[in-house]
Structures are given as structure tokens and as C-alpha cells.
Image (cartoon, rainbow, N blue to C red):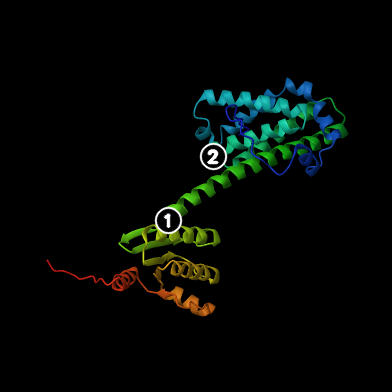
Amino acid sequence: MFNDSSDNQTVWGEAHTASEYKELYRITEADLEHIRALRNSMSDRISEMIDPFYLWLEQLPEFHEFFPDSNIVERVKSLQTDYWRIFFEAEINETYVAQRRRIGEAHARIGLPLPSYFAAVNMFQELFNRILETEKLKADQKVATAESFGKLLHLDTAIVVETYNRIIEDTLTAHAKSLMEMSTPVTQIWNGILLLPIVGIIDSKRAGDIMNGTLEKIAESQARIFILDISGVGVVDTAVANHLIKITQATRLMGCDCTISGVSPSIAQTIVDLGIDVGKVKTTATMKDALADGFSRLGMEIVETKN
């Protein structure tokens, strides 16, 4: 929570520059002056924010998960002290934004849930407001300073969360790509016969990957039969059906006959209800039927033998 990462200098690109962030969150020079006015007094009082924060933090169930030993606690306390010193300097430039992004990277890397981060931000704001009440400022100055503090804290939170979300999304995309590649292996199961079982959702990107992989495998193996099994596909709509038809047409142009197997009654009913013209696409209810038909077209026959 408010972790930094001294060994990770990667700065993730964002849509906003420091100036754009200030404009977006309506942070004026007057706001920054309110924060800077407390720089000297807060440099001696940062511990009044951090120490109570950890008393609160220790009560949370996830505390020991992210802080398994005292050395980590002390290191993070030191990083948070640096964070708040930079905060009260209130110099919003690209270096400032990059440092906040590194905090987002660190939070994503350790897997800190965003609700926990938001709770921590809220607690720090409460602790600051308590300290502000003891400052020798006029009532209107305290109100203005509290508002300026909130603006800058919201800016920091936005940068951290944007970076956090981007890293998580990139990780999920990479995992999805890996799973997709694992779930779409075109396999030569017999001389002249290729099989591809599809599991999950078929979108335009995946359909394109399937087509490219299939055509490359056909060219490599000179296969004459291609079986596309869709028994693991949960939903078949107009778009999915059109993708499947295009794949069969492309394989036919390569001189390879395609059969779509695993067409369940519900999928067949959906295709009929949608009025999709499957044209010359050959289909079977089961992969077994598709294999038997494929062997037959190659002039072979499966014969059961008795021991």
C-alpha cells in the first residue's frame, strides 16, 4: 500500500502528461501552493500519518499476507515517507507522474486488491485532516488546503490505478493468448487427416488465428481432410457461424475437404433459427462420425476386431 519499486524503472505509457493530469483534476497553482505551505511542518509530522496508519493496517486480514515480516514493514514505511515528502513538494511534472506509475506497477506485481488500496488512501486522507486541524491556519485556509490535498491525492490515485489496471489487463491478455494457443492445436491424427478441437469462444481474432494455423498446417502436411470439432464451443451465433463457414471455404481452396463435427441439437437449432446458410459445409454430430467419413473418403475403413 503506497509501495514503490526501486529496482523497476519501467514507466508504463499513459494517455496523459503531467500538465494534462493537472488540467483534468483542476489542480491550480493555488492548490499546489496550499500543499507547499505545509511542506516544512509536515516533513516533521509524516510519522504522525504513517504510524497510526500501520496500527489501522495491522487489523486488516490481508496485513500478514503482504507484510510477512518486520523488515518489509520498515522498508515500506521508508518508501511511504519518501512518497509523502515528494507529495508535499507539490512539483507535478513528468518525474512525479513516473514515480506514481511505479507505485501502480508495484501494487499490481504483489497482487494488492484495489479495494484495499482505496481503503488505505481514505485512511491517509483522514489522518491528514486530523493533522491539519492542529495547524495554525485560519478556518478558510484549512478548508482550502483540505480541498487541495484531496485533489492531489485523487490525481495520485488515478495514476496508480490506471497503471495497475493496464498491467493486470496486459497479464490477462497474455494468459488468454497462451490459453487460446494451447486450445487451438491443429494435429495430424493420420496421414492426410487433420483435427482441430475448439474450446471456448470464437471471435474475429481467434477465427483468424485458427484459419492461419490451419492453412499453414494443410500446406505443410498436404492433408486432404480437415475436421473442425466445435463440441466445446458454448455459443454459436451469426458471427461464429460465418467464421466457421469462411474457414471451411479457405480449406477447400487449399484442396482439403472440411467437416465440422460436434454439432449439437441446440447448435443446429440456433443455426436454423438464425437463418444461416451453411451452403456446402459438411457437418456431423460427433467427432467419431467425422473420422469415419474422413477415412472413407481416403479409401480406408475402420474395422473392429475381436480378441
The residue that label 1 is drawn on is 183
Q: Which quadrant does the C terminus fall into?
A: bottom left
Quarter of the image holding residue 13?
Answer: top right
Q: Is residue 231 above or below residue 187?
A: below
Indicate the amino acid at tag 1.
Answer: Ser
Label for residue 54?
none
Residue 148 sits in which quadrant? top right
Q: Residues within 10 Å of mark 1 (few under 14, many from 20)?
A: some
From this view, report whether residue 39 is shown above or below residue 223.
Answer: above
Judging from the image, what secondary structure is the residue with disc 1 in?
Answer: helix
Q: Secondary structure at mark 2?
A: loop
- Give the distance between the C-alpha atoms of the residues marked 1 and 2, in whole angstroms: 27 Å
Q: Locate residue 231, reporting x and y percent.
A: 40, 67
| Observer able to see residue 115 | no
Task: Answer with mark 1 or mark 2, whichever residue precedes in sequence.
Answer: 2
Return the residue nearer the eye: 40 or 276.
276
Q: Nearer the viewer, residue 14 or 303?
A: 303
Question: Going by the image, does 205 lie left or right of 268?
Answer: right
Residue occupying the point 52% across, 47% down: 174
Instruction: Decide which of 83, 296 is in the foreground and name it.
Output: 296
Instruction: Give the image location of residue 162, x and y in percent.
Output: 66, 43
Residue highlighted by disc 2: 111
